[in-house]
C-alpha cells in the first residue's frame, strides 16, 4: 500500500459511525511494589502493597479503544455493566471523544465483568476475575437487542464480540444472534467469539486457526462460500489471511518482532482495524495490511492492553 492510498482510506475514518456490541469488561491493573515488604499480623502471610491502580476498557472495550485511537468519528458502545465500583470505573473509562453511551446499560441485575491484573515490574501475576455465572436476564437481553436493531441502519459497521466463557451469561446470547440473523446481508456486521462462531448468522467473521477448525470447514474459503461473507483468520506469527465468497484469498505475513512482546489485545486491535478499513472502502488486501500493522504495534506495548493510532500504522506500512 502506498502513502496516497493509506491517506485515502484513513482520512475517511473521522466520518465513520461504528457500533461495538458485546462483552465490555474492566481491565484493572494493580501495580505492586515488591520493595515495600510487610507481613500480615493477622495471618502471618506476605502483604502485596499496591502503589497504583489503573483501569481501562477491555474485551469489547479494547475494540472501542482502538477505534477511538484511529480517529473514528462516532463509536456506539452497546453492552452492560453492573451498578458497582467496577462499573463506575468502566463507564468513566469509556467516556472518550466520539464515544456514545446511550445504549450502554448499567444494571443491578449484572455485575461488571472485570479482569483484575496484579502486576510486578511490568509482569502480570495470577489474574483475579469477576464474572457473571447466571444467564443474562431477559429484560437485559431485550434492551441490548432493541439497541442493535435501532443502530443497525444508522452505522457504517457493527462489530460483535462474544468474550465470556459460559454461554448465555454475557451480551451475545441466542436471542441476540437471532436478531443479527435478521440483519445479516443488509448491514456490515463483523463478528468474533472466543467460544467459536459455530451457529452464528452469516456475517463477516474473524477468528483464529483453532476457531476455524472448530467450524467444521476445511478452509477459510469454504466457510466464506458457505456464509457468503468474508472470513478473516489470524495466524499468530504467520500473519493474517482473508477469504472472499468468490474464492479470492489474500495472506499478509506478520511484521518482524522488534524486541519483547505482549500479545494481549492484539486480536481486538485486528478486529477494530478490519472493521474501520472495510467500512472506509479498503480492499481485502488493504484491510489485512492495516490490521496486521495494528497487531504489530500493539504487541510491542508491554504491560497494558494497547492500541494503534493512524500515525503508528503509517510508520509500519509506508514509513515515516
Image (cartoon, grey):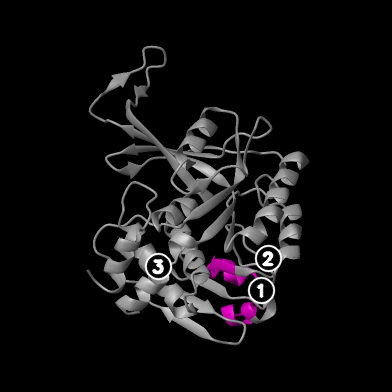
Mark 1 or mark 3, whichever is nearer to me: 3
Q: Nearer the viewer, residue 125 or 90?
A: 90
| Distance (Cα) linking label 1 and label 2 | 8 Å
Residues under numbered marks 3 and 2 in contact, where contact means CB atoms less than 8 Å apart: no
Q: Nearer the viewer, residue 313 or 4?
A: 4
Instruction: Decide which of tag 3 and tag 2 comes sooner along the chain.
Output: 3
Mark 1 or mark 2, whichever is nearer to me: 2
Neighbours of disc 1 within 10 Å: few (<14), some (14-19), many (20+): few
| Count of numbered tags | 3
Residue holding disc 1: 216
Instruction: Decide which of tag 1 and tag 3 comes sooner along the chain.
Output: 3
Magenta residues, as a range?
A: 205-224
Please tell me whether mark 3 sits on a helix, a strand or a loop.
Answer: helix
Can residue 124 be spotted in the picture?
yes
In the rendering, which numbered label is found on residue 10? 3
Mark 3 or mark 2, whichever is nearer to me: 3
Amino acid at each position: 500500500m502506498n502513502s496516497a492510498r493509506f491517506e485515502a482510506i484513513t482520512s475517511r475514518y473521522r466520518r465513520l459511525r461504528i457500533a461495538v456490541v458485546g462483552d465490555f469488561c474492566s481491565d484493572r491493573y494493580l501495580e505492586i511494589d515488591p520493595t515495600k515488604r510487610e507481613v500480615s499480623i493477622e495471618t502471618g502471610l506476605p502483604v502485596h502493597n499496591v502503589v497504583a491502580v489503573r483501569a481501562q476498557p477491555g474485551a469489547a472495550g479494547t475494540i472501542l479503544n482502538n477505534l477511538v485511537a484511529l480517529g473514528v468519528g462516532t463509536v456506539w458502545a452497546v453492552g452492560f455493566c453492573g451498578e458497582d465500583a467496577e462499573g463506575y470505573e468502566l463507564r468513566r473509562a469509556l467516556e472518550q471523544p466520539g464515544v456514545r453511551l446511550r445504549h450502554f446499560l448499567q444494571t443491578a441485575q449484572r455485575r461488571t465483568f472485570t479482569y483484575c491484573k496484579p502486576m510486578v515490574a511490568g509482569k502480570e501475576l495470577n489474574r483475579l476475575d469477576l464474572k457473571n455465572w447466571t444467564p443474562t436476564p431477559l429484560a437485559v437481553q431485550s434492551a441490548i437487542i432493541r439497541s442493535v436493531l435501532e443502530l443497525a441502519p444508522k452505522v457504517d459497521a457493527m462489530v460483535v464480540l462474544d468474550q465470556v466463557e459460559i454461554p448465555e451469561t454475557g451480551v451475545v446470547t441466542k436471542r441476540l444472534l437471532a436478531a443479527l440473523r435478521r440483519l445479516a446481508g443488509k448491514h456490515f456486521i463483523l463478528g468474533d467469539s472466543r467460544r467459536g462462531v459455530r451457529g452464528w448468522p452469516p456475517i463477516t467473521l474473524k477468528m483464529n486457526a483453532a476457531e476455524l477448525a472448530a467450524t467444521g470447514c476445511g478452509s477459510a474459503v469454504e466457510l466464506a462460500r458457505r456464509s457468503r461473507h468474508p472470513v478473516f483468520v489470524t495466524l499468530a506469527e504467520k500473519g493474517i489471511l482473508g477469504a472472499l465468497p468468490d474464492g479470492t484469498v489474500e495472506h499478509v505475513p506478520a511484521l518482524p518482532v522488534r524486541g519483547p512482546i505482549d500479545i494481549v489485545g492484539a486480536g481486538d486491535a485486528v478486529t477494530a482495524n478490519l472493521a474501520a478499513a472495510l467500512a472506509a472502502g479498503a480492499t481485502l488486501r488493504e484491510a489485512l495490511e492495516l490490521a496486521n500493522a495494528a497487531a504489530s504495534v500493539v504487541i510491542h506495548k508491554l504491560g497494558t492492553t494497547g492500541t494503534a493510532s493512524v500515525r503508528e500504522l503509517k510508520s509500519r506500512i509506508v514509513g515515516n
